[in-house]
Amino acid sequence: MRKGIIPGVGVFVLFLIYLLAGNRGTVSCILKEERVTLARRDIVPFLETLEARWKRTPLRLVIAGKAFEVPKDALRIRWNIKAMKKKVAQGKRVPLLVEWDEEKAKALLESLATKTLLPPQDAFWEGNRVQQARAGRRLNVEKALHALKQSLEDWSDTVTLETFDVLPPRVDTSEVLKSRGITTLLASFATSLKDREEDVVFNIEKAAASLSGYLLKKGEVFSFNAVVGRAEKEDGYRKTRILANGRLVPGYGGGVCQVASTLYNALLRTEAEILERHPHSGYASITAYVPPGLDAAVSYGSKDLRFRFPSQDVVILAYLREQELVCEIWGERENPVTTTVTQKLLKLAKTGEAEGTLTVETVVQRTRSKDLRFVDTYLIPWDFASEIARCLSGS
């Protein structure tokens, strides 16, 4: 068991520290990021008083988003006051050096590893949908023990443990797709979730789950709204900010358009025939996951994303990966299409004290498919204009 004890300091060095303390019989050190000056005879009583107060606050362990409170006495945690006294006497930053019952700590973490276990999920067909394989995870107890002690030395009472082992599924998604003749990844596109609000990410994950795994037969028309459905409060979506008439307003389902836009950009890299696509009425930071002109706004009953594949069956997958939303299109044979996207800023003009309009032309050239050309106009916050111009200029 690691004690964390610093080797003894020579008499000469202690004498120098004694002189530098600035006051006979006192020493100054950094304790919990604060400088403390103590009489030497008071070091041990001071540390013992702090320890007693510290023990009254339970440890809060956060594992996979779940919080657990643990009384410190349950682990028989105690301060190594002898070693900490030496740190104080040296006038240094004093870490919290602890000793505990290793077996009790390990038993606790084993119990929490079981409670937070995420089993792997094998891929399988459910009707005409494929349920994707999902890796599982389990807390690595040995690594968690080390991480916990390191956090305690930094005086943390709340410790997030992220030392997981990955548990792979036995049956991968690609294996299950092959059973229906779906063998090839035609295209993939990802958009960032970085700095997105928690409720927006919730909505994105919910919409992606409604979409993912869909088997689209050759020639069948896919409707985003028909598959994903409405995105209102009663449908289980959360309230966020949405764009309405070009401006940000409170509303339910913010984030669903990011799923539609991510899917749309994956489709542009395939032979898909785009039958319906709409831009947003405005462009702002909440829609900057794709450049203006490459978004796909959806609103149940009015704006839809519709498409079909003329020559093969495909499967659509949508899922979150770390800080990204990923959409994949899988098909029966190699992708026959090479895509080139060209964008041109046609107009950027201030129309009010804090607003402006943006007009952008987007040309999508695809081999063996008809070129697509869109001219989209957006209402924008003017303080966002320079960033938009940089985005479209590629700088």
Image: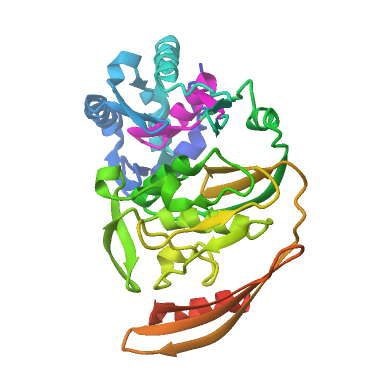
Residue 190 sits above or below residue 5 on the image = below
Residue toward you, 316 or 108: 316
Q: Is residue 306 left or right of residue 302?
A: right
Residue 280 sits above or below residue 205 on the image = below
User: Percent x, y for residue 201?
Assistant: 40, 48
Q: Residue at x 43, y 18 (%)?
A: 109
Q: Does the magenta portion include 240?
A: no
* Quadrant position of residue 216: top right
Q: Which residues are magenta?
A: 134-162
The colour scheme applied to this rendered structure is: rainbow
Residue toward you, 205 or 50: 205
The number of callouts visible is 0
* Quadrant position of residue 15: top left
Q: Residue at x 34, y 34 (%)?
A: 158
Q: Residue at x 36, y 36 (%)?
A: 155
Q: Quadrant of the C terminus?
A: bottom right
User: Percent x, y for residue 343?
Assistant: 62, 76
Q: Is residue 369 left or right of residue 361?
A: right
Q: Does the magenta portion include 153?
A: yes
User: Percent x, y for residue 296?
Assistant: 49, 63
User: Percent x, y for residue 331?
Assistant: 69, 43
Residue 200 sits above or below residue 294 on the image = above
Residue toward you, 383 or 120: 120
